[in-house]
Image: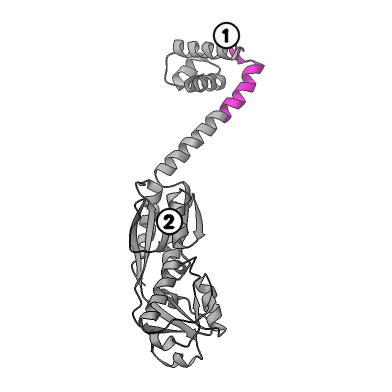
Amino acid sequence: MELRQLRYFVALAEELHFGRAARRVHVSQPPLSQQIRALEEELGARLFDRTSRRVMLTPEGEAFLEDVRGVLRGLEEAVDRVRGVAQGERGRLRVGFVGSAVSTRFPAGVAAFRERHPAVRLELRESGTLVQRRAIAEGRLDVGLFRNLGETPDDLTTEPFLHDSYILALPERHPLARRDSVNLADLRDVPLVMYPRPVFPAAYDAIIEACRSVGFSPRIGQEAVSIGTQKALVAAGTGVAIVPGATRREPREGVAYRTLAGPLPDIRLDLAWRKGRDDALLRAFLDAVRPFGMEG
């Protein structure tokens, strides 16, 4: 059974005239008649009653017509979906991001993509850098935004999204809040609110190493995965937190931000996707979010 046979059948069923049906599907009448007969032979059923004066659908033909219309309609919708995906207008995109990204302009970039491509099903998943790297490599994420690890894995393509510096978040009434700038060494006896190392090992190790380089091992008072939880703990007076500078964009009652002087590395967030992938949907997302990066 061929697709053209189904289209010829629908045309004849709706026109009930071989000549008009043939003109509608842009063929001459004999080939259309031959294909209808071939279809009936394959089905083992007569679809039309033909006389010299008229063409009528048989009961079998009426039942078949309803189903064939559904098949053709589904096919047209499938073609539209494929074309939409090929043009970056439809489909599903799974996007990972580290928690600190919510304090950057990355959410605005995601909103811009949603506005331009409303038919795309966007799935957002907050997770750590290593989790994202594995998920992209295994095909469970399409694109990620994570902390730069200083090297590009062989199976990923990355590009810089944002450069930032660490600052200090501390309770508003903390003695160090009276200063405009705090030295990292001044945190020797102050409990820190930190990321759990298994979730964000690069950020954790960078902060620990910086503290040790100025002569002390930090005292970890609390651990929290998200920046929001860290700020809540700071506001409650459980300690101070070393956070990305972009965090200033989201003030919280009870929390003050101060410049932090010391040998802390810059923060860099990278966009990443599987090496070799270059489709319209991915390009559309990257084009939408790029203008919102490269600043802290």
- Looking at the image, residue 1 lies above or below residue 113: above
Quarter of the image for residue 261 reads bottom left
Q: Give the mark toward the camera: 1 or 2.
A: 2
**Magenta-drawn segment:** 45-70
Residue 53 pos. (x, y %): 57, 8
Quarter of the image for residue 166 reads bottom left
- Looking at the image, residue 206 lies above or below residue 4: below
Question: Relative to the observer, which residue lies in front, 77 or 166?
Answer: 166
How many residues crowd around disc 1 within 10 Å: few (fewer than 14), some, or many (20 or more)? few
Residue holding disc 2:
133
Q: Is residue 194 magenta?
A: no
Counting residues from the start of the chain, the first of labels 1 and 2 encountered is 1
- Looking at the image, residue 183 lies above or below residue 4: below
Look at the image and tell me in which quarter the C terminus lies: bottom left
Judging from the image, what secondary structure is the residue with disc 2 in? Answer: helix
Q: Residue at x 61, y 21 (%)?
A: 64
Residue 104 visible to the viewer: no
What type is the residue that disc 2 sits on? Answer: Arg
Residue holding disc 1:
53
What type is the residue that disc 1 sits on? Answer: Arg
Q: Residue at x 49, y 11 (%)?
A: 33
Discs 1, 2 touching: Cβ within 8 Å? no
Residue 256 pos. (x, y %): 47, 85
Q: Residue at x 34, y 46 (%)?
A: 276
